[in-house]
Amino acid sequence: MIKSCVTIALVPEIKTGPWIFWENMETSMAKAADLGFDAIELFTPSADAIEPEILTTLLQKYNLALAAVGTGAGKVIKGLTLTDPNQEIRKQSISFIIDMISFGAQFGAPAIIGSMQGNVVPGVERERALEWLAEGLTILGIYAEARGVTLIYEPLNRYETNLINRLEEGTAFINALATINVKLLADLFHMNIEEASLPESIRAYGTSIGHVHFADSNRRPVGLGHTNITDIAAALREINYQGYVSAEAFPWPNPDEAAKQTIESFKQYFNN
């Protein structure tokens, strides 16, 4: 069963980003529950920013699951990436993500590595940067497996990373790791830039997909751009995708309307 999810970001430094809710966590969760979302995807400044007992209580109160936790604050706040030329920074990056994995695993939720993958920076050979990324993902994938969750790696578009941009590249990369516990995040916004055909890429590399980000071509909520969601939904059904479709989109024109637009689109394409 494909399940609905909405993003909640609690990191002021990324407030201009593509996340639906920005308010108090409980207020956002109450709104998500009222609209009928199955889960939330949470972005926090750190692994200890929220007491697990408080989150447990709220998830139970609003009958929501925690679908995933984001790690982007590690880069935005601390400047950490897995491909930094400085070995100490790479170690700190792994440590930050390990803490996020541990936090999410308490709720059966995977951690997502997006911006913390970094870039191939001037003076570093591409092959070396990919080696660093592989080393980090392997360590983190094995750690996540020991805690009963997968690790989610997100290919980003060319304007956000020069490492891996397409599902084909991502699949080849994770298949070469010394762990089978890393899955890909299929972000429809990034895919709209990089993939020749979103449905065909999903069909071809569906066994690698562990999470989906639900946004239209302009990164507004689905239904407010020109992405052909009908064919994408069909492709996800064909690969028997059973995970979350999570709204990582700009809160346009405002969070409440964006959340409403998202759940209506989800029902249109996945509840029929």
Image (cartoon, rainbow, N blue to C red):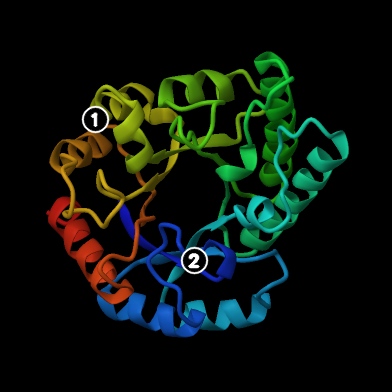
C-alpha gap between disc 1 and disc 2: 31 Å
Question: Which amino acid type corresponds to the residue marked 2 in the rendered image?
Answer: Lys
Residue 161, x across and y down, in percent: 53, 33
Looking at the rendering, which quadrant does residue 233 occupy? Answer: top left
Q: SS class of the residue under badge 1?
A: helix
Q: Which label was assigned to residue 15?
A: 2
Indicate which label's residue lies in the foreground, 1 or 2.
2
Report which residue position mark 1 lands on: 199
Q: Residue at x 68, y 29 (%)?
A: 133
Between 264 and 44, the one lying in front of the other is: 44
Q: Taking the image as drawn, is residue 31 in sight?
A: yes
Question: Which amino acid type corresponds to the residue marked 1 in the rendered image?
Answer: Pro
Q: Taking the image as drawn, is residue 11 in sight?
A: no
Residue most extreme to the front: 122
Residue most extreme to the right: 88
Q: Is residue 120 toward the left or the right of residue 262 in the image? A: right
Residue 33, x across and y down, in percent: 34, 78
